[in-house]
Amino acid sequence: MNTRTLIDYIKGALSPEERGAVAEWIDASEEHRAEYKALRRIYDIILWNPVREQAAASKPRAWRTWALAAAIAAVLVTGGLMLRPVLGGKSTAPLSMNAISVPNGRELNLELADGSHVWLNAGSRLSFDPDAKDRRVYLEGEGYFVVAPDPDKPFVVETFGHDVQVLGTEFNVKARKDLRLWEVALVTGSVRILNHQGKEVTTLSPGKRIALCGNGLLVSRLDENALLWKDGILSFDNLTLNEILRRISDYYGVRFDTSGLKTGDKRYTGKFRSQAGYEHILKSLRMIHGDFNFSREECEDGELVRIY
């Protein structure tokens, strides 16, 4: 069932005939009922967030509607997203926040209320204070930002490593605290890299990438193939099979057992549509590599793929 149709059903915007068809679809299976209930919960959270309602009269309209615009955009793109309060994370983040989380194996493109666009990679989370007066978000994972210009209100992306401040530009941020992985790639415009006290560390010019390296930061040339994920493309450039498997594991949320694999030092370069799934990638690599097989197992803690 089309997600937009389900939302219109919840809103009561369908004709009697259309409502009857949706009701029959919902009753047809437990899976349909679960999908409807999940979407209904998200819609109710969007409409009845008490914090946003209490503060609505005193906040600027564009930023009062930040949470609503972002959440509805998420729901319209995919019903598998979650909108929920954030109870942990970086210590400087407000405790009462909303978050949009993207499941493994998917990407999300949404438009914020100020006109900025954000692409979120698989397994990423964008958090924000729905009552904030400034343009500030908190990112865990990877996000590609096209920020609408506003000289009076800088746009800030906070992460575990450093913060990124812009006025209006196009850039990519990757921040994985569990892997101690942090980097910013600038496509157009300029960005300021700030520490958590708000002090400028450095600025970045277009076509450059800055990344955490030990206890410092290293600037290098931007490889635009690394940004193809926002177009649904996984790009591998001169990687070993084990490195590719780690990338696949990170994106699709699947575990690999490579204890029986002898990979040597071969390296591979290629591009794959993420929607094709990891099995398609493995089969393609097997045609090139020529001497491995794989099998899938369902375990209590998720799917395990054995490479041998």
Image: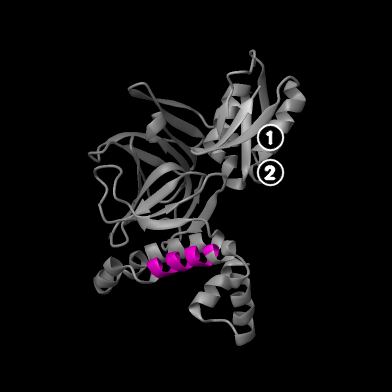
Which residue is identified by label 2?
A: 276
Q: Circle 1 — which element?
A: helix
From where the camera sits, is residue 240 visible? no
Q: Which mark is residue 222?
A: none
Q: Is residue 56 left or right of residue 291?
A: left
Give the amino acid type for the residue marked by disc 1 in the picture.
Answer: Ile
Q: Circle 2 — which element?
A: helix
| Callout count | 2
Residue drawn at the location 57% of the way across and 44% of the way down = 105
- Whichever of labels 2 and 1 marks the residue nearer the N terminus, that label is 2
Which residue is identified by label 1?
A: 281
Snapshot quadrant of residue 180 = top left
User: Where 62 falls versus 125 (above or below)?
Assistant: below
* In the foreground, 19 or 105: 19
Tags 2 and 1 touching, CB below 8 Å: yes
Give the percent coordinates (x, y) of residue 261: 63, 18
